Amino acid sequence: MARMKFICDAERCIECNGCVTACKNEHEIPWGVNRRRVVTLNDGVPGEKSISVACMHCSDAPCMAVCPVNCFYKTDEGVVLHDKDICIGCGYCSYACPFGAPQFPGQGAFGVRGKMDKCTFCAGGPEANGSQAEFEKYGRNRLAEGKLPACAEMCSTKALLAGDGDVVADIFRNRVVKRNKGAEVWGWGTAYGSKQAGQPQPAAAAEGKS
Amino acid sequence: MKTTFSLMALCLCLVACGEKPQTLGNPRSDTAPYTGTTATAFASPGWKAGDKTSWEQQLRARGQYGQNDYTRAP
């Protein structure tokens, strides 16, 4: 099996926030913590694009690199998880993460920062699979139930895909071939200069700066 | 005699320079998802807990029929 991955098809995402709701409901996430969010660029302008963002379970995860207490670990499926019993809530992972995935629950009247919480790819944590302790700290362990993350399975337009990287890539490739457009995922234009991504081209960006 | 003292001094110096390991313990080991869950009431049917191949096939199949609408549309 390849690594578990998320991908969000910006051509399909309609900013319904169903993925956010599914995640919060499935794991009983407290108020103020959003493991998943929908981000819209050029909101209200024709051609706006939205994507659903959470932990991307990076292959070379910066959160793991900067954690001073080494609370992160990666499963054989490539899912980046952490141990809340080791986490000290310092927030370094939050500064390092380019996706804003690490979340910190505010506890108490003065917003004391608690232990970090983030998307687990519905894979729970170090506690026994499906145990009450695991659920209370990390939420449901759907992978151990033979299911995929709730956010992707609940996505009404199937914009958000999750699962084995090979399967996800295969589904996305098939879509692009069938509709003959929208091969770019978020950031593709910035990285590779594609003219279809609806993002500022290098020339336009240079004019904007001058 | 002089050589012996030199060697002893060298050994002492090297021991003094030694540093205790400061590595942190890794997080507790996690149980692989293919081993199944204790919350069996929520487990999806169609695969056998503990059988890695069966679990992988289950997720691959679920990924396809749940997310690939081109395989369902006529």
Image: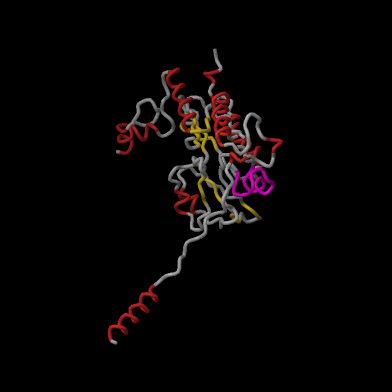
Q: Quadrant of residue B54?
A: top right
The foreground one among A163 and A118 is A163
* Camera-nearest residue between A13 and B48: B48
For the C terminus of chain A, the image quarter is top left
A186 on left or right of B46: left
Vertical side of B16 occupied by A193: above or below: above
* The one of B49 and A102 positioned closer to us in this rendering: B49
Q: Residue B60, image x and y in percent?
A: 54, 29
Residue A105, x across and y down, in percent: 61, 50
Residue A143, placed above or below residue A69: above
In this view, the residue farthest toward the left is B2
- Position in image of residue A56 (x %, y %): 49, 40
Rendering coords of residue A8 (x, y %): 49, 31
**In the image, what residue occupies the spot 45% across and 29% down?**
A169
Chain part drawn in magenta = A124-139
Judged from this view, the residue extending furthest toward the bottom is B1
User: In screen coordinates, is A151 left or right of A188?
Assistant: right
Magenta span includes A133: yes
Q: Quadrant of residue A20?
A: top right
**In this picture, is A58 found above or below A72?**
above
Colouring method of the image: secondary structure
Q: Residue furthest top?
A: B74
Frontmost residue, A89 versus B42: B42
Q: Is residue A152 magenta?
A: no
Q: Residue at x 53, y 23 (%)?
A: B68
| Count of numbered tags | 0
